[in-house]
Image: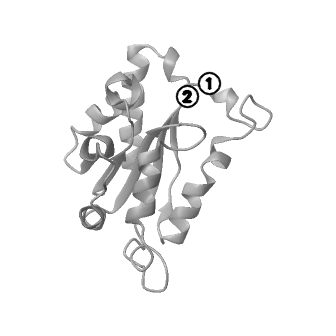
């Protein structure tokens, strides 16, 4: 498996069955680094140089988060704004991420049927994640298929554990 950096952004990980299960499962893999932004930066002050060095050490980058207001939690957006800087991640000199692979691992409270044209939320997950796809494109990363687990509030413990295994397989085989 490619050396993978999972950037985890969940402001209340202790209360999340799904994202905690994903984290715990991924921590068991030698080729996966799980980087919890809310633990590392409780004050929101991001160490840009550290984050950029961390990105350079990995071939694949995964953003793991619960869907909040049709996007990611705010610290992940702050991370993007600070770390993916002009001249480093994009622009004529910004080629540091070129050739890396990028994917999303997203959990939602709502069911899958709610995330489609005409569904409760009106838009598909692919439509809602277009900004992340555009970010990958601008930074020269190859956007891989998104892993999504829907309806996490109603899942059994066995279904949560299966989702964690499925995420690992998705990361390995994408």
Q: Quadrant of residue 121?
A: top right
Q: Which residue is mark 1?
A: 111
Q: Is residue 79 left or right of residue 32?
A: right
Residue 106 drawn at (x, y percent) = 49, 39
Q: Quadrant of residue 12?
A: top left
Q: Is residue 58 above or below residue 106?
A: below
Question: Can residue 117 be spotted in the picture?
Answer: yes
Contact? badges 2 and 1 (CB < 8 Å): yes
Q: Residue at x 49, y 64 (%)?
A: 142
Q: Residue at x 40, y 51 (%)?
A: 62
- Answer few, some or many: residues within 10 Å of disc 2's Cα (few below 14, many 20 plus, some between 14 and 19): many
Q: Which residue is mark 2?
A: 150
Q: Is residue 142 left or right of residue 15?
A: right
Question: Can residue 1 be spotted in the picture?
Answer: no
The count of marks equals: 2
Work out whether mark 2 precedes mark 1 in sequence or the reverse, and give the earlier one.
Answer: 1
- Answer few, some or many: residues within 10 Å of disc 1's Cα (few below 14, many 20 plus, some between 14 and 19): some
Residue at disc 1, secondary structure:
loop
Q: Is residue 10 above or below residue 136?
A: above
Residue 164 drawn at (x, y percent) = 37, 31
Q: Quadrant of residue 79?
A: bottom left
**Cα–Cα span, label 2 and label 1:** 5 Å
Residue 28 drawn at (x, y percent) = 21, 37
Q: Residue furthest right?
A: 118
Q: Residue at x 42, y 80 (%)?
A: 87
Q: Is residue 41 above or below residue 151?
A: below
The one nearer the camera, 168 or 64, is 64
Residue 107 drawn at (x, y percent) = 49, 33
């Amino acid at each position: 498996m490619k050396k993978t950096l999972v950037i985890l952004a969940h402001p209340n990980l202790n209360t999340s069955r799904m994202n905690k299960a994903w984290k715990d499962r991924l921590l068991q893999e030698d080729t996966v680094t799980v980087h919890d932004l809310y633990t590392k930066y409780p004050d929101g002050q991001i160490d840009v140089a550290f984050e950029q060095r961390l990105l350079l050490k990995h071939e694949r980058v995964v953003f793991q988060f619960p869907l909040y207001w049709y996007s990611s939690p705010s610290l992940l957006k702050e991370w993007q704004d600070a770390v993916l800087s002009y001249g480093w991640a994009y622009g004529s000199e910004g080629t540091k991420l070129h050739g890396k692979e990028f994917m999303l691992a997203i959990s939602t409270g709502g069911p899958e049927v709610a995330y489609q044209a005409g569904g409760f939320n009106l838009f598909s997950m692919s439509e809602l994640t277009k900004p992340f796809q555009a970010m990958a494109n601008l930074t020269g990363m190859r956007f891989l298929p998104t892993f999504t687990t829907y309806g996490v509030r109603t899942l059994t413990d066995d279904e949560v554990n299966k989702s964690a295994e499925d995420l690992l397989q998705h990361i390995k085989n994408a």
